[in-house]
Image: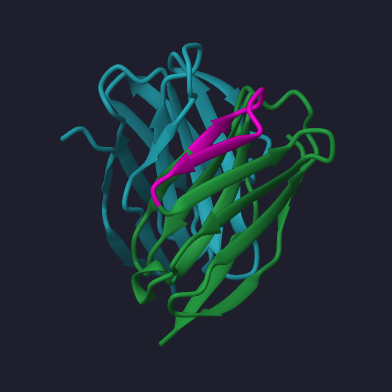
Chain colours: A cyan, B green
Amino acid sequence: DARVTQTPRHKVTEMGQEVTMRCQPILGHNTVFWYRQTMMQGLELLAYFRNRAPLDDSGMPKDRFSAEMPDATLATLKIQPSEPRDSAVYFCASGFFGGSGNTIYFGEGSWLTVV
Amino acid sequence: GEDVEQSLFLSVREGDSSVINCTYTDSSSTYLYWYKQEPGAGLQLLTYIFSNMDMKQDQRLTVLLNKKDKHLSLRIADTQTGDSAIYFCAETYNDMRFGAGTRLTVKP
């Protein structure tokens, strides 16, 4: 049963610490998204990649956030240094764009709390 | 990306129909989607409609698309307590943009 896998599922960290979230997209998908969900802002698109190339990271605070896709099986989202306002659920999603449907599938999320 | 808007809350009684509405602004959207999110979980795809269709039915779900008005709706027939969740409308062209989500509460 193919699924998007995210780690860690839950993370509590102190302000100023580095946080790295990882995502394994579904094999064969060419597009990977990072979203952040908070009560106040809803679901925000942070960045996305197509064929491992970053296409848009305009939704991401550039000074502390970085997103990479070192290979087709791994996408990372890093926050350095983390701040309490970064507390949120971070979702990775993957899909195949260019065929029919453009459907994306979500991981279960990484629940981040920065204290 | 363009904006996707939804009302935030909907409350219905069990057995009634629910209608969740969404408006979008990007006329180049090729597909429009409905996702469901239950507490503590990720978003699950419910159904989608291609932009050249105006209706799609899938069991208890009916999706209506008015492309002229850029209006999308999801009707859930015979709503059950298990349908209580947040429902997200999304549009796609190169990326995928979501509305804020509509929290559906089903009362027994």
Quarter of the rendering containing residue A42: bottom right
Q: Which one is nearer the viewer's eye here, B47 or A32?
A: B47
The residue sitting at 30% across, 17% down in the picture is A28
A6, above or below A100, in the image = below
Q: Residue A101: image x %, image y %? A: 48, 23
Residue B59 lies left or right of residue B95; in this view the side is left
State the extent of the magenta-drawn residues as a range.
Answer: B48-59
Residue B97 in the image: x percent, y percent? 63, 40
Residue A111 as seen in the image, left or right of residue B13 = left
Residue depicted at 53% across the width and 30% down the height: A48
Residue at 58% over, 42% down: A46
- Residue A64 seen: no
Q: Quadrant of residue B69?
A: top right
The question of residue B55 being in magenta is answered with yes
Give me the residue at 49% from left, 24% from top.
Answer: A102
Establish if B103 lies above or below A59.
below
Quarter of the picture holding the N terminus of chain B: top right
Q: Is residue B56 magenta?
A: yes
Residue A109: % across, % down: 36, 53
Whether residue A25 is visible, yes or no, is: yes
As rendered, which of A26 and A81 lies closer to the eye? A26
Residue A29: image location, x then y, percent: 36, 20
The residue furthest left is A1
